[in-house]
């Protein structure tokens, strides 16, 4: 019997559609199609898109590059959500146009925090002790 996706793990279809939406949004934002000063002045990376099981809702994780202001970027994306949703629906062939909810991607900050912890003197001392064994 084939394994079905559960509430905690996305189906292959959800992942595929999420990736298509991510590519479409990345293209729109990188080309500067949105006429908003906050979005055109800062490059934005669309790191992940998580689709709901019915494919009607998309949570879009974004990260402004070059030290851009996350709050200003999120506000500008929310302000232009109708245009972005229309562009996604034109580029991704779906039965329904998914609603977009924008969130800041915190995974880079978490990775940096873990990296800084691994570089502390205490961890280096513990690792040196293991190499001797």
Image: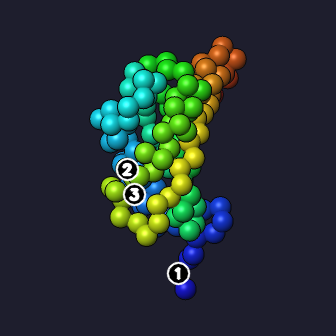
* Residue occupying image coordinates x 40% and y 45%: 25
Q: Whole-percent x and y of residue 82?
A: 48, 47
Q: Name the residue tied to disc 2.
A: 87
Mark 2 surroundings: few (<14), some (14-19) or many (≥20) residues within 10 A: some
Q: Label 3 belongs to which residue?
A: 89
1 or 2: mark nearer the eye: 2
* Residue positioned most to the right: 122
Report whether 81 appears left or right of 127: left
- Observer-side mark, 3 or 1, equals 3
Horizontal and vertical percent for residue 78?
55, 39
Q: List the residue tagged with mark 1.
A: 2
Q: In this view, does 74 lie to the left or right of 125?
A: left
Report whether residue 131 is seen: no
Q: Residues within 10 Å of mark 3 (few under 14, many from 20)?
A: some
Asked which quadrant contains residue 41, the reply is top left
Q: Is mark 1 on a helix, strand or loop?
A: loop
Q: Quadrant of residue 26?
A: top left
Q: Earlier in the sequence, mark 3 or mark 1?
A: 1
Which residue lies at the image location 44% right of the left edge and 19% below the top edge? Answer: 66
- Residue at 55% in and 25% down: 72
Q: What element carries label 2?
A: helix
Relative to 47, is 56 above or below? below
Reading the chain from its start, which is encountered first: label 1 or label 2? 1
Along the viewing direction, whichever of 3 and 82 lies nearer the viewer = 82
Classify mark 1: residues with Cα within 10 Å, few (<14), some (14-19) or many (20+).
few
30 on left or right of 64: left
Q: Does residue 87 appear in the picture of this structure? A: yes
- Which part of the image, by quadrant, shows the N terminus? bottom right
SS of the residue under disc 3: helix
Residue for point 41% across, 52% down = 86
Distance between the alpha carbons at the discs numbered 1 and 2: 35 Å
Q: Is residue 13 above or below residue 124?
A: below
């Amino acid at each position: 019997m084939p394994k079905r996706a559960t509430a905690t793990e996305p189906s292959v279809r959800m992942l595929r559609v999420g990736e298509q939406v991510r590519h479409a949004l990345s293209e729109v934002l990188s080309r500067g199609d949105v006429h908003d000063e906050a979005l055109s002045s800062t490059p934005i990376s669309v790191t992940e898109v998580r689709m709901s099981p019915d494919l009607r809702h998309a949570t879009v994780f974004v990260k402004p590059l070059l030290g851009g202001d996350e709050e200003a970027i999120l506000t500008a994306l929310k302000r232009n959500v109708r245009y972005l949703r229309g562009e996604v629906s034109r580029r991704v062939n779906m039965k329904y146009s998914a609603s977009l909810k924008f969130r800041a991607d915190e995974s880079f900050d978490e990775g940096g925090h873990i990296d800084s912890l691994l570089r502390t003197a205490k961890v280096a001392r513990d690792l040196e002790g293991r190499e001797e064994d």
